[in-house]
Amino acid sequence: MGRPRFYRQNLISQINSVSQKSLWGWLVKETQEKYGMAPAEARLVALKGQAFLHQISGRGENQIEIELTAKEYSGRRQKRGDLPQRAVIMTPVSSDDRK
């Protein structure tokens, strides 16, 4: 009974949810709401804006930068703010995950 399920269905729906909340999606929404552009124009402006932001930040697409505690200090019992931090670049959603 019910609808048929397929392998990794929940994972795929979560990946689609995260990809909808991406920088590109936010830029499209903001461009449409603030400047009243057509959807096709908003997507083009968002694409160019995202490429510019990636160019000046030095990160690739779908990458985020998170400050984490340095490895050599990870076992210490101190407040996180007191320990040295290092920037780590992560890719939470890859284009290969959307299959």
Image (tube, rainbow, N blue to C red):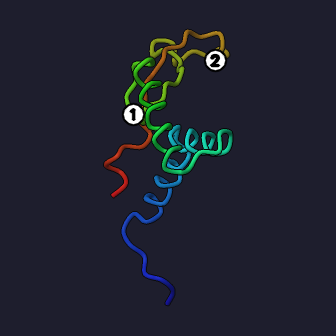
Residue of label 1: 61
Determine which quarter of the picture holds residue 4. bottom left
Residue 75, compared with residue 5, is above or below; it is above
Spot occupied by residue 34 in the image (x, y as percentages of width and height): 68, 39
Residue 92, compared with residue 73, is above or below; it is below
Q: Quick one: label 2, few (<14), some, or many (20+) residues within 10 Å? A: few
Q: Amino acid at mark 1?
A: Glu
Q: Nearer the viewer, residue 96 or 69?
A: 96
Determine which quarter of the picture holds residue 90. top left
Q: CA distance from mark 2 to mark 1?
A: 29 Å
For the C terminus, give its image quadrant. bottom left
Side of 70 relative to 35 (left or right): left
Q: Which mark is residue 80?
A: 2
Q: Nearer the viewer, residue 19 or 52?
A: 52
- Determine the residue positioned at 34% across, 46% down: 95
Considering the numbered disc 1 on the image, is that residue within a helix, a strand or a loop?
Answer: loop
Spot occupied by residue 58 in the image (x, y as percentages of width and height): 39, 19
Total residue callouts: 2
Considering the numbered disc 2 on the image, is that residue within a helix, a strand or a loop?
Answer: helix
Q: Nearer the viewer, residue 36 or 3?
A: 36
- Determine the residue positioned at 48% across, 50% down: 40
- Determine the residue positioned at 45% across, 41% down: 44
Q: Nearer the viewer, residue 41 or 62?
A: 41
